[in-house]
Image: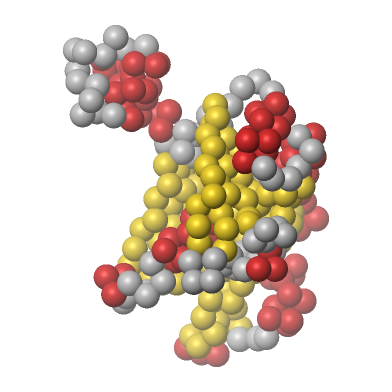
Amino acid sequence: MSALFAKLSGKKTAKDGSTVGLDIGSSSVKVIKLKRLKDNVELVSLGVEGVGLDLVPTLKMLSQENDFKKCNVSVSGSSSITRYINFPKMTETELKQALKFEAQKHIPFGIAEVGLDSHILKNDLPDNKMLVLLAAAKKELIVQRIKILEDAALRPGIIDMDSMAIINAFMFNYPEDEYFRNKAVAVLNIGASYTSLSILDDGIPRLSRDIHIAGNNFTNKLMDNFAFDFDSAEKLKVNPEKEKLGTVA
């Protein structure tokens, strides 16, 4: 999980200047291909496919349709964790050296089980402290994600956390927006199985959590309340204005 807060740069793009993000969710796989221009980013292609019993054919199809072999991916869920911690003030090099010893106090996994990364968010806190982002994911989860890609003849680039990828996208699109300055902002990504919540204060992340209430819970509630089948409840959830009650088959 390197470069958690890295924005798009030429060093992480393909020969044609493009970069690909792949989101493997529980209900669908999304891929987006971007190209770095001089002063902006261009959307090259976008693909969405439902998740079947075997992910590999779906990934192969998406890679062929969108012409890529290397992609950036992210992880989330109970096997990953993000924490924001006050550390004694130190350099990035010193933080990397101290990370394994300090991290064990803040994560529920054994250090040997996880991949760790960190980033200094603020280094001017009172009492000679600094605010540090600590991210950890079980190695088993990372290995599983890499194997799926390799089975589809793909190569992983950056392996990020879902919450960090969403924060990066938000900050890239609203880097100096006056509306968000000196304010707290909640960034919410509702998937099928997980909801990712991040809270930023004056552009600095302060909290990130994966919540086990998401789109499928809403669909199931509609099924219970209106005696709909799953597909009808899903249509109503996605487009409530179009799918009026009583007109959904």
Location of residue 47 in the rendering, given as x and y in whole percent from the top left corner? 54, 37
The colour style of the image is: secondary structure
Q: Is residue 72 left or right of residue 202?
A: right
Residue 22 appears anywhere in the view: yes
Measuring 68% from the left and 63% from the top, which residue is drawn there? 12
Q: Image height check: is 59 above or below 95?
A: above
Q: Quadrant of the N terminus?
A: bottom right
Q: Quadrant of the C terminus?
A: top left
Q: Quadrant of residue 174?
A: bottom left
Location of residue 121 in the rendering, given as x and y in whole percent from the top left corner? 53, 76
Residue 205 appears anywhere in the view: no
Q: Nearer the viewer, residue 186 or 150?
A: 150
Q: Image height check: is 142 above or below 247?
A: below
Location of residue 26 in the rendering, given as x and y in whole percent from the top left corner? 56, 32
Q: Image height check: is 57 above or below 155?
A: above
Measuring 54% from the left and 26% from the top, which residue is drawn there? 50
Measuring 34% from the left and 22% from the top, which residue is drawn there? 235
Location of residue 207 in the rendering, given as x and y in whole percent from the top left corner? 46, 61
Measuring 63% from the left and 35% from the top, which residue is drawn there? 65
Q: Image height check: is 115 above or below 191?
A: below
